[in-house]
Image (cartoon, rainbow, N blue to C red):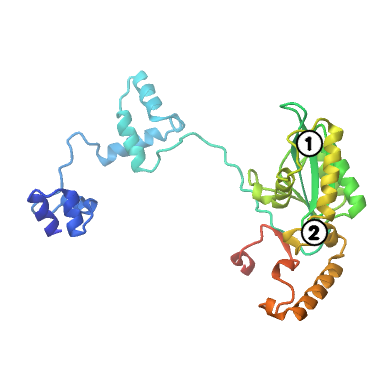
Amino acid sequence: MTAYQALTRAGTTTRDAARVTGIARSSAERDRLRPTLSRPAPRVPANAFTAGERELVLRLLNSPEFIDAAPAQIYAALLDQGVYVASIASMYRILRENRQVGDRRRLARHPARARPELVADRPRQVFSWDITKLAGPVKGTYFDAYVMIDIYSRFIVGVKVHARESGALAQAMMREVFDTHGVPHVVHADRGTSMTSKSVADLLEDLDVTRSHSRPKVSNDNPFSEAWFKTLKYAPVFPDRFASLPEARAFMTEFVTWYNHAHRHSGIGLHTPAEVHHDRHHTVRAGRETTLTAARAAHPHRFSTTRLLPKILDLPDQVWINQPGPESQAA
């Protein structure tokens, strides 16, 4: 620090002195202002508030009359009453010293929503559903596609396209899905009006199905439905608009059929959702093993590992929505 001070006294700029000595200019400035025997602490201004006066001002700012008001409002109100206690700047300074600068109004406090944590280790345990918009024939018109997916098999167990969104239509789709594929343990959805409607809630309660909902504004809590909608809308065959409701329904039926029975999904060992959902994947896996065994025997130099099937062909043991971390599992 002595070298820094000597350089600056000799006329060297603070930037060059900092570069030569390696001392930050901010550190040097703090050292310069630090009281010493030869440089006592600066005197307190004669017009400064005493500790007692600051306490009185703070008590006034936090009084029931002014607790919700900004300092400028308090200042004007007091002047109108013929009272002056401090300037607006002084009020802010006292609030800042007490860490009270911010929104002083009483704000709503929404309760924290629980993070949904759902797991499935076979089909028909957890269904996830959502509604997406399909553009209609003219700008501003839309059809609503109701889609329900089995999160383990990725099989689309239900799809309906309607001209509007309602809880009654969602309930009707669910009844049809449950009659065809069985009643799951859990149905997960976001917090849309149809998802939280009384008709849907009553149906799930009657069937003893656990209802699960995403946290508000957390799309990652419903990843399987959101991912499927992206697969749908980024498909090369997906049109910009649908000319009519029957056209939208026909397209969705055809697309879901392809997805369920022809699309090899990377999340389920490159099986089709139908193979996993209907427990046919064991036969498919055995056929893959036979093919690769024959290939390995014919060309052993082309296989660098002893593993028969590559990892990408493995079916996961469990599928999660928000899998807890190691800390949560240990607890």
Q: Quadrant of residue 160?
A: top right
Query: The residue under label 1 is which amino acid type?
Result: Asp
Q: Secondary structure at mark 2?
A: loop
> Could you classify mark 1 by the number of other residues whose Cα lies within 10 Å: few (under 14), some (14-19), or many (20 or more)?
many
Labels 2 & 1 near each other (Cβ < 8 A): no
> Could you classify mark 2 by the number of other residues whose Cα lies within 10 Å: few (under 14), some (14-19), or many (20 or more)?
many
Camera-side residue of 327 and 43 = 327
Residue shown at 77%/28% (left/top)?
Answer: 137
- The label on residue 124 is none
| Quarter the N terminus occupies | bottom left
Query: The residue under label 2 is which amino acid type?
Result: Ser
Q: Residue furthest right?
A: 179
Q: Is residue 276 left or right of residue 104?
A: right
- The label on residue 144 is 1
| Quarter the C terminus occupies | bottom right
Image location of residue 322, percent across then percent down: 66, 57
Image location of residue 307, percent across then percent down: 71, 77
Residue shown at 71%/71% (left/top)?
Answer: 310
Q: Is residue 45 left or right of residue 87?
A: left
Camera-side residue of 327 and 120 = 120
Q: Quadrant of residue 191?
A: top right
Q: Secondary structure at mark 1?
A: strand
Residue 149, visible in the rendered structure: yes
Residue shown at 83%/50% (left/top)?
Answer: 258
Say above or below: 128 vs 91.
Answer: below
Q: Is residue 323 left or right of residue 180?
A: left
Give the CA distance from mark 2 to mark 1. 24 Å
Read off the residue under disc 2. Answer: 153
Image location of residue 277, percent across then percent down: 84, 59
Residue 209, visible in the rendered structure: no
Residue shown at 79%/51% (left/top)?
Answer: 149
